[in-house]
Amino acid sequence: MAATDTQTKGRVRAPLAPWLKGTATTLLSICVTMLGLLFVTFIIGRVMPIDPVLAIVGERASQSTYDAVFLELGLDKPLLVQFGYYIWDVLHGDFGDSLLNARPVSEDIARVFPATMELATLGVLVGIFLGVPLGVIAAVRRGSWIDQIARVVALVGYSMPIFWLGLMGLLVFYGILGWVGGPGRLDIFYEDIVPARTGMILIDAALARDWDVFRNAFSHIVLPASLLGYYSLAYISRMTRSFMLEQLSSEYVTTARVKGLSERQVIWGHAFKNIRVQLITVIALSYANLLEGSVLTEIIFSWPGIGSYITTALLSADMNAVLGGTVVVGLIFICLNIFSDLLYRVFDPRSK
Amino acid sequence: MTVFTKMLSGAAMGLALAVTSGAAFAETPPNMLVIANRIDDITTLDPAESFEFAGSDVSRNIYQKLVNFDPANLDGGYQPEVAESWTVSDDGKTITFTIRDGLTFHSGNPVTAEDVEFSLQRAVILNKTPSFILTQFGFTADNAADTIKADGNTVTIVTDQPYATSFVLNCLTATIGGIVDKKTVMANEVDGDMGNEWLKTNSAGSGAYKLSSWKPNESVTLTSNPDFYLGAPAMKRVIVRHVQESASQRLLLERGDIDIARDLNPEDVKGAMAADDIRIHDEMRGRLMYISMNQKHPELSKPEVRQAIKHLIDYEGMQNSFLNGQYVIHQNFLPKTFLGAVDENPFDLNVAKAKELLAAAGVDGLELEVGVRESQDRIEIAQSMQNTFAQAGIKLNITVGTAKQVLGRYRARELDVYLGAWGPDYPDPHTNAGTFAYNPDNSDAANATGLLAWRNSWDTGGLTDVVGKTVIENDRAVRAKLYGEIQATFRDTSPFAVMFQKIEQAGVRDNVQNLNLGGATTAVSYWPVTK
């Protein structure tokens, strides 16, 4: 029995140790990545040619006012000391207050990030649901008119400046046709009607069962989301086509066809199955890029998202806001990486 | 967005809008005013600290002041508001204000002399950026309790010199003169901050509107005060939305989703003019565009060279091309409509005369660096100057940069030439006279970075004394005359070439009436607006 007990314990411990080790390694790498990210951002923020003191006190402040704020911000201390103080605060959950609007950075981010998340999620869904089939069909019908169309769609998506396309979209669909809402997340009359539970208006309106607000919010988001979706579509469809072409020229596909499997089974049951892992990477990257915030889209559509928040903060030398935003963007990438890893395991047993 | 992308997007939008027609499909409610504006400069809404354009617009509608401007009669100067009347002592140093009865804050608390005393003392003690507007009268954190005192329904302020009463009262119309509700503010005090943190994002005033919400870079919402002493405003809600792009503002305006668009570029102004139900509302603002020449530069310190450069600027060409409608030629440091403003613009582009002056100064092959902050109109002005300066053999190198790069060097007296804009801090001529033509100590050690004359190492000669005397001249007509004389000397001798004064062009829907943006002296007033 003793021997059996030992064996049982051994069996229990054996899978636990690698799991713990793996988790610890992941956590450690997250910490190191975040620390490195913050350090680089912090240093760049300090050496970039914008003066946070002038940004606060204004051009015409006296030297004494300037000096007082300089000391108040702790800018007289060595860079490493300043960074140490910052990290200490962050570890205590305090990202500090925005230098410019005096509000906690965490509150600002909680306000702007859901707006970006809502937009990016819809955008990437458009990209996935249109881009993947388009890429597959383009690969299967290589050289056909569908492939040519897919190429043109992708080429336009890659090369057309987003601000131009955004303005044209606004002009045509909002200004002339009146099919969609204008810049902003809602018409003025619908603002602050539904309680902000998630900060994503579509979800908040659905939770509140206020379908008027939902429709209005949808009319505002549909154009910028389609625009972002189009750019995702261009990337996803090209990559899907490329992955599929590689698979379709493989011997196992020829074998499957020789065995008499239907074309549908060959394409979706065999070839497509094998590109899912690569596609996950492409989609995750695409989604992460959108979640960082598309600054130009946010500016044109007056969308108060994290992209324009970080950009405005950067140009105003509001380093607390920049660093807070950087943490969020860093976390997005890390979370999507972890999520992608999990999906790899689902779709590719070898990675287990 | 970079300048390039802005220009490209503007051009694209302009072209597209030019060949289409944007009919209005919607309309805002009759008791709601919706404005598109750039409001990302708002950093605080505490009147003791607020010092930005968009913040002044909000503050003017929330806070009353002892004296204030009537939007229906801006030329009439300051008028009684919280102060019903005032008297000035014989020595000219003490002003006693009698507080109007029956005023109430949004909280329901009555507006008292104690609130006035608290508000002014608080602004001095907090010592935020705009505090110099009050401390220039000799108020300090130490003496505020003695120099600003309430007694019954009167408040007395005692200045260190017998300043012109108009100067003191003009300063009290600035944002920092806003009267706050002492009880409400002190109930929100944290660590002895006199409610500063709370008031940054909340309001405690007695004006026509109260603050409902401020979402940074997103919107400001004001709700009308039904107990406003001039009557409840017709617009029950005023919403100012942050819309950065001119083209987006124009689309919103033409669709009827907003009533006023305040940041239209010249192309969109032109386009909006052609649209139905929209008019362009022009108002002269106080902002000046100028260049200045560092007097540490051996060649720029020669009077002939300064004169030559003033003749190498294509004022008319710029006014009639890329600045069309947005700026008007103005070569004096007092904006039009200010007390003492003059309308003499003696300089024009005259390359031959400039060459003569340069030859007389013995200058040949001059190379200069001009510092410009990243802004489309300023860069275009610099490029125009680069072209016209070259015609007289002056090579102008343009350095475009951020505030730290350009402003930092300007404040450190390192730039040859600076191209910038200046707006008055308060609606009194001393605001500009005291910086353009006043420099009591020109030494590096003085470090008077707030004075434009010092930044350019310019010893103003006798002008500093004259400016000092003019600010204590109590006869309004004499004071105006003196400012005229100061500006005449300034035009001829100073290293400044003031070029243009700003015109704000707002796109307004036809049903919006009685709009006043504040002219050169104050900020926008929402309470008289009707639809």
Image (cartoon, coloured by chain):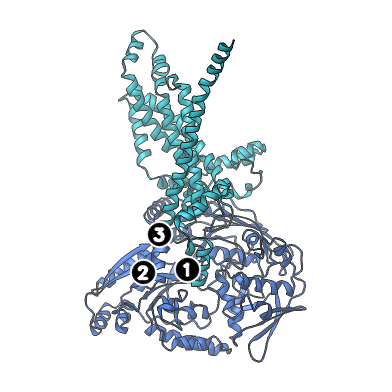
Q: Which residue is mark 1?
A: A59
Kind of residue indicated by mark 2: Met
Of callouts 1 and 3, the N-terminal one = 3
Q: Which residue is mark 3?
A: A49
* Chain containing the residue with disc 3: A
Chain with blue colouring? B
What residue is shown at x 44% (from left), y 84% (from top)? B487
What residue is shown at x 48% (from left), y 37% (from top)? A28
Q: Are marks 1 and 3 on the same chain?
A: yes
Q: Which residue is mark 2?
A: B318
**Residue B299 in which image quadrant:** bottom left
| Residue A120 image point, x, y percent | 50, 39
Kind of residue indicated by mark 3: Pro
Q: Who is closer to the viewer here, B462 or B497?
A: B462
Mark 1: few/some/many CA within 10 Å (<14, 14-19, 20+)? some
Q: CA distance from mark 1 to mark 2?
A: 26 Å
**Residue lying furthest front:** A2
Which label belongs to residue B239?
A: none
